[in-house]
Image: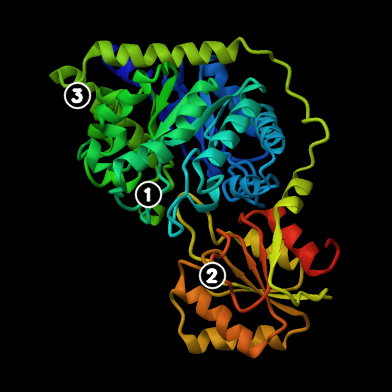
Amino acid sequence: MTDELERLAASVLWPGFLGTEAPEWLLAELRDGLAGVVYFGQNIGEGLSSLSASILAANPDALIGIDEEGGSVTRLESATGSTLPGAAQLGVLDDVAATQATGAELARRVRAVGANVVLGPVADVNTDPRNPVIGVRSFGSDERLVSRHVVAQVGGIQQGAVAACVKHFPGHGDTHLDSHHSLPEIALDIEEYERVHLAPFRAALEAGVACIMTAHIVVPAWGDEPATLNPRVLGMLREWGFDGVIITDALDMAAIRETVGIGPGAARALAAGADLICIGNPTNPGIAAAPDQDRRDYLAARDGIVAALRDGTLARERIAEAAARVRTLAARLRSADSALPRDPAGYDPADVVRRAVSVTGSGVVAASALAVVDARRRSSLAVDSAAGYVSRALADGDLAVRLDVESTSQETQDSVLADAIAANGTTVLLVDRPDADAGQRKLVERAALRDPGAVVVNVGLAARHPLPLPTIEVGAASRVGAQVARERLLGRIG
C-alpha cells in the first residue's frame, strides 16, 4: 500500500513510460494521485487518443505533456517528420501572426490526441552558432525577435485550452555543449546574460504563460549548481511574480543523472523551487535500458523525494506548495472548453515554410531528378537530427544515400560523391552544420570542385560563411521543409 509520503511525492512527478499502452504500474500510480505523464516518440501510435483516455480515466486531473515544437522536434509525427514550421523558420519570416497561428495549430493537434501541455515554445536566444542542442529550435539570436515570437506562440497555444511551457530557463542559447550528455557552464558576462537571455522569459511571464521549464546549465555568477537545482535561479521567477508551474527539464539527462542522480536530483529540484519533476524518456539509455526502465526511473525519483522528506532536507510545506500549483493548473485545463479548437483560419503551414526558405548563391537550375547525399550529424537525444524522413522527403523516390562524415574516410566520402554525381539527377548535399562542422564544409568544397552544378540543402542554422555552391536555407530538419526544398530544386516554386 502506498504511504502518505509516497503519494505526496507522486503528486509532483511526471514520468515517461514504455509502449503505446499505459502499463499497469503507471495506471495504479495515476489512480493514487500521480501528476501525469509525458509522451515521447515510442508512445505514439494509432491508439494515442485511447491511451490518453485511459490515463485520464485513471486520474481525470492528469497533465499529459508532449514535446511538440514543430520543425526539427516532433513526437506526434516522429515517424514521418513534422508538417509544421519550426522556430528558426518563423523567426526568419518574422510574421507574428504566422507564429501565433502555428501555436494554435500545435494546440489543436495536441488536444486532438487528448494531451494538454505543450513543452514549448523554446525561449532560448541562440547566440552561439555552435550550439548542438538548441540551434534552429530557437527563433533567433536577437532577444527582441525571440521575445515577440515567444509571446505570439504562447498566445496561440493557450487560446486552444492547452498549457504552454517555455524553455529552458534561464537560457540555453549560449552554449556549445549538450546538457543531454554533459553539464554546460555559461561564463558570459552576467549583465549581458541577464539583458539578452532572460528577456524572452520575462516576456512570456508577462503574457501569462502557464509553465516554465528549467535548464541543466551552470551560470557561475549565480552559483555552482545547475539552474534546475539552484534556488537563486528559480527564485528569480517568483521574484518576477510568476505563480505558474516550474517544470524541470528531464532528470535522466546526463547533466543530472550522471552527477547527483535522479533521486537526489528530484529532491533538490523541489527544494530549489521546482513544482513538477519531468523524469524523462526511458528509451534514452539505448541498448543499456532495462525492460522496466520506465518504472525504475520513476521509483528512483519518488524514493529520492521520500528520503529527503524523511530526513528533513526537503520540507513538506515546499512539496505541498508545488503540488498545489500542479493541481491548480490541472483544474484550469479540466474546466476549459471541451470543444476542440478549429483549424486556424487561412493557415497553411507549407506556405509559411515556403515564405521562410531562401536561396543563397546562383546557378540553381531546375532539376529533373535528385541524387541526395545526406551528410548531417548523428542524431541526439533532443533532436533526431539524422532522421531518414528528411532525406526521403527530399529525394521522394530519387537516389538518397546516408554519409556520416564523422566516421568515414575521405576516400569513402569521395566514392559516395562520385556515385551521386554519376547518377541521373542533380547532386544535392544535405547538411545541418556547415559552419560548425568542418567535415560537412569540406565535403561541400570537394563536391563543388567535382560538380559545379551541385546544390546544398541546409536544414540547420543559416551559413554565416558562404559555401562554394548555391544553398537552399531551410532552417529545420522536417518533412515539410524537405518537401519545400524539393519544390525549389525541381523549379516548381521560385
User: Could you say which disc has been placed on residue 307 in the image?
Assistant: 3
Which residue bears the numbered disc 2?
Answer: 465
| Front position in the image: 7 or 203 | 203
Element assignment for label 3: helix
Secondary structure found at label 2: loop
The residue depicted at 54 percent of the width and 80 percent of the height is: 443
**What kind of element bears circle 1?**
loop
* Residue 303 can be seen, yes or no: no
* Local crowd size for mark 1, using a 10 Å CA cut-off: few (<14), some (14–19), many (≥20): many
Looking at the image, the residue that sits furthest to the left is 311
Q: Amino acid at mark 1?
A: His
Determine the image quadrant of residue 425: bottom right
Left/right placement of residue 271 relative to residue 337 reads left
Task: Name the residue: 75% across, 44% down.
Answer: 349
Q: Which residue is mark 1?
A: 180
* Pointer 2 local density, CA inside 10 Å: few below 14, some 14–19, many at least 20: few
Does residue 376 appear to the left or right of 322 in the view shown? right
